[in-house]
Image: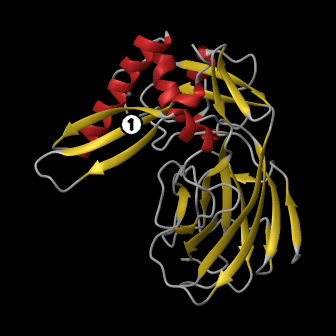
Amino acid sequence: MAASSLHLLRTGVHYGWSRDHPPLYSVASGTELSVETQDASGGQLRPGSTSQSVLGLDFGRVNPVCGPVFVEGAKVGDVLQVDILDVVPGTYGWTALIPGFGLLADRFAEPWLHIWDFDGDEAIFTDSIRVPIQPFCGVLGVAPAESGLHSVIPPRRVGGNMDTRQLGAGTTLYLPIEVDGALFGVGDTHAAQGDGEVCGTAIEGSMTVSLRLSVRHDMDIDTPEFDLTTPLERPTAAAAGYHVTTGIEPDLMRATRQSVERMIVHLQNYYDLNAQQAYALCSVAVDLRISEVVDAPNWVVSAFLPKDLFSPG
């Protein structure tokens, strides 16, 4: 069916990218979609879940992607323009430490889970720590050219699990098309995340996403690109300031680890958090920056902690 607007229920999902998935719908270029996404656990983690629930996850149901949607007129070599119009969170979210997953998986081998209650525009971590909600889509992508079924976990040149927190309302994303019809999908919606998503999860939750899909014949890109109109810095964070830790190493990943490890120590020393809480807070609220990659042999990665998360005192 072709339509100028369409609503997708969260029951219409797939669990891997494939050029052979039959499309749920066929839409004209310029169609607006309203999509009900599932959370990254596919509903397995919810209020009442515990750390033991993390151990019981069925990974065959993780990272469901709503779609695919066939876009009429989209040909190989074209570009799919995705205008993100709105992202509306549900009433709760979750953040987990999953054994074997995340930047510091070797240090955090035990499962851990926090269920976040949403209070207006904030997610509650502790009595004195609240994270501003800034919802976005972790997964936005189209089908790759290669045959077979491809995991949703790694990002790809056609998009997918990019976990880029700027992909929220007001952003226009451009995806290179490798399959006729594009076969677009969206999922893994987040209420908040720091740049890096270091523990492997953000504030995960189901949401309603409004998008517009348009075919561009006049663009030529090899990997995703996007236009951003919203400020990169939250006004309240700019006013409150930041505490920054650094990693300085000849390897960027080692420098990244070092900056996060030092931030965990800072959060434990000054905010009375245990190591698991500190690691999770880094994932949902601390922004990583590559500060320097030219002064060989060492590179600098900085971790920025916004002070507006914390109640006075």
* Three-letter amino acid code at the position of disc 1: Ala
- Classify 10 Å Cα crowding around label 1: few (below 14), some (14-19), many (20 and above): many
**Measured from the top left, where is residue 162 in percent x and y?**
52, 54
Quarter of the picture containing the C terminus is: top right
Left or right of residue 236: residue 252: left
In front here: 52 or 228?
A: 228
Choose top left, top right, bottom left or bottom right for residue 20.
bottom right
Tell me which residue sits at (61%, 31%) in the image.
Answer: 58
In front here: 273 or 89?
A: 273
**Measured from the top left, where is residue 222 in percent x and y?**
44, 76
Tell me which residue sits at (10%, 48%) in the image.
Answer: 297
Q: Residue furthest bottom?
A: 218
Tell me which residue sits at (66%, 43%) in the image.
Answer: 134
Asked if 8 appears above or below 3 in the picture, the reply is above
Color encoding of the figure = secondary structure
To which residue does mark 1 refer? 303
Q: How many marks?
A: 1
The answer, for residue 201, to whether it is visible in the render is no
Quarter of the picture containing the N terminus is: bottom right
Asked if 8 appears above or below 281 in the picture, the reply is below
**Measured from the top left, where is residue 208 in percent x and y?**
80, 49
